[in-house]
Amino acid sequence: MAKKVQTLSCVLNLNLLLHLLLCLPIITFSSSSVNEFGLNDNNIPITLSSFHYSKSTLNPYSWRYIRVDLPPGFASMSINLESDLDIDPRTVKKLPKSKLPIICFRDGGPPLPDVSNIALTVLSTPANHSIGGIQVLQLVDQCHPLQENTVLMFTNEQISSGALYIGLFNGFGSASTQSKMIIRGSDFSFSTNISVEGCPTSGMWGQYCNQTVVPLSCVQSDVSTNIKNHSDTEKITTCRNSFEASCTGYRAPRGYSLDVSGMVEELKIMTVNVSLNERSLTNNTGNVIGVLYARYGAMPSGSLYDFSIDINKTPLVIRSPKVGRWYVSLLPGKQTQGKLSMEDNNINSDLCYSLDWQVRECPVGKAGPNCTWESHMLQTIMSKNALPFESYYWPIGETISPASSKFLLEPLLSKSSFGEYAWTYFLLDIPRGAAGGNIHVQLSSDDVLDYEIYSRVGGLPSLSTWDYYYSNKTSSSNGSIFFKLYDASENAVNFYILYPKEGTWSFGLRHPVRSDGSNKHQTFMSIASERCPNGCSSPHGTCHNSMDASGLTLYSYCFCDRDHGGFDCSIEIVSRKGHIWHSIALIASNGAAILPAFWTLRHKVSVNFLVTNRVYWGSQIQFTIYLVINILHTPYVLGSSRDLALSKIQSLENPYNIGF
């Protein structure tokens, strides 16, 4: 039987072999190979979208962003990038950051390799990453050195649906935003083809659309309410699937999808009516062996999942699940030395079961285990004369202050707790296309701050589940790529979340609850959406805006003066001492040039005299020293590197424009 198999080749750094995990085979199906892969004409992947970015040039220290929207039913995304680069993969690690062309990926927002040296270590981070329900945003970032031809494929088992951002960088580092007169480095040209494939029917899944996915619909439901008091009513919805005693085998697992439509407190998934057929295996105690897996945004497996539990110990409890689509799979297995193993090739049993699930949610404005904590939705207030997506957030129902974006915190805090501390939540929305801005959070008090701040996109944060947090001066997410702490004093905190993912963000304040309910101090909070962080450390830089190549996202960046660099222009590149030497060389060269220039112009000396004149050549040396320092430190870009070099050489050959 003829089978056409075309292997995907990833042209990546040979020293970074871990990234070969990204490279999966691309299979071209012939009529004879379709059945072999469990496919038919109705579920062969189809092209959902295809983009071609024509040839363009990337100058030194420049970058380009491309946004790709991946729908929920996508199967894979392939990237074919061609360039005129000629870099030996064996020398990639020896190249300085300023001369290293790279390609970076980030889920939900533009990548920022300039923010931290972490971008270099990310080059060796495996692509498949999922940690027990704690989705830490910075761990999904990946960067690769660019080659002449770079071919990559991502499947729906590696990345979830939504907006994926691709960044091309011709060198990176703190100097990439610094103003320069002469930009050293090499340009390169590139063109890109991006293709997204998906399954023709919603009930299929996988790179080749050969896995069955059953959407869980609520047929038998039981909605109950648990009344705490007059205002706090907890709603519990229990559902059972539409199928009874569904059976699955080890080699043909079935997946299920479940949509969480809002901020809920808890999701429980239970297996019921579990049974085995006559050929099935049991353990020594006669219990059925199997594992229930759950994963957000992608189908779980024995090696990639967010939550798991032995089916004999269900329900599987997911607290504060993220809004969106969850996938569930139950796999038969055996138990060895207290651990569940899914790698027994002798398992040929069928496992029959039904699924129940339960969603527990609080009424609007409430949150927490017993719906006794306060939750406030923040409305967007556009700033006066603001740029697009520049705004601040204000609690709905509170009187808006036109003079300040800060609101008083104490009247909004939760008054009840299950111990010494309570939580108060604030929810806000980052709209589509606004991922190129920044979230600015400030707290200030007339007393010592006793608040901890936890943030999360798509779900409520907790002590164990968060994306970014600030606890105190020594405990925060300040080591993260996309979290920047500017102030952490006893009575104030000031930080930015850079390029936040689109969607609903929640900020949870963990704070003590006083027994008498009184609070004699005042604390103000401000949450704003700003274009550039910290005002580009004005006056060291200015904020600029641009669109990504797809035209779907507006992003902002800082353009710094000749002395500073970094994503926020806070890094001093040229010191004050360097400026002093620059000034001395400038004054000395000009002083040395005055006398011989005046004398030669007055007497119209010959060429032979100039060659033997020591005063003239002394001034030439002084001018050369000044020229070198001037090239290193002059900020403004006046033209191309070649034109500037020629003009400098010409002026060096004849600095006084003497005619012979």
Image (spheres, rainbow, N blue to C red):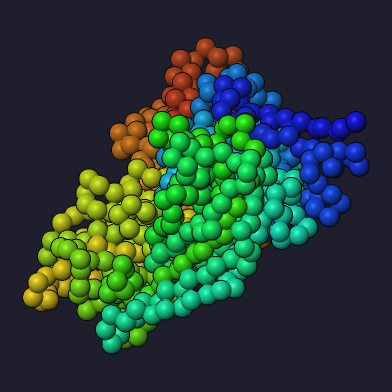
- On the image, the x and y values in percent for residue 47 come to 79, 53
Residue at the far front in the pictured view: 278
Q: Nearer the viewer, residue 635 or 78?
A: 78
Q: How many marks?
A: 0
Q: Where does the C terminus fall, quadrant-wise?
A: top right
Residue positioned 42% across, 74% down in the render = 236
Residue 276 horizontal/vertical position (percent): 58, 48
Q: Residue furthest top?
A: 612
Q: Nearer the viewer, residue 173 or 116?
A: 116
Q: Is 446 situated left or right of 577 in this image? A: left
Where residue 22 sits in the image (x, y, percent)?
63, 35
- Tell me if 577 is positioned left or right of 122 in this view: left
Residue 304: in sight, yes or no? no
The residue at 29%/49% (across/down) is 476
Residue 431 in the image: above or below residue 295: below
Front-most of 396 and 344? Answer: 344
Task: Give x and y (percent) for residue 491.
Answer: 17, 61
Residue 271 shows up from this direction: yes
Residue beneath the point at 79% across and 37% down: 27
Q: Residue at x 18, y 55 (%)?
A: 489
* Residue 15 falls in image quadrant: top right
Instruction: In the rendered view, tell whether residue 605 sits above or below residue 539.
Output: above
- Which quadrant is home to the N terminus? top right
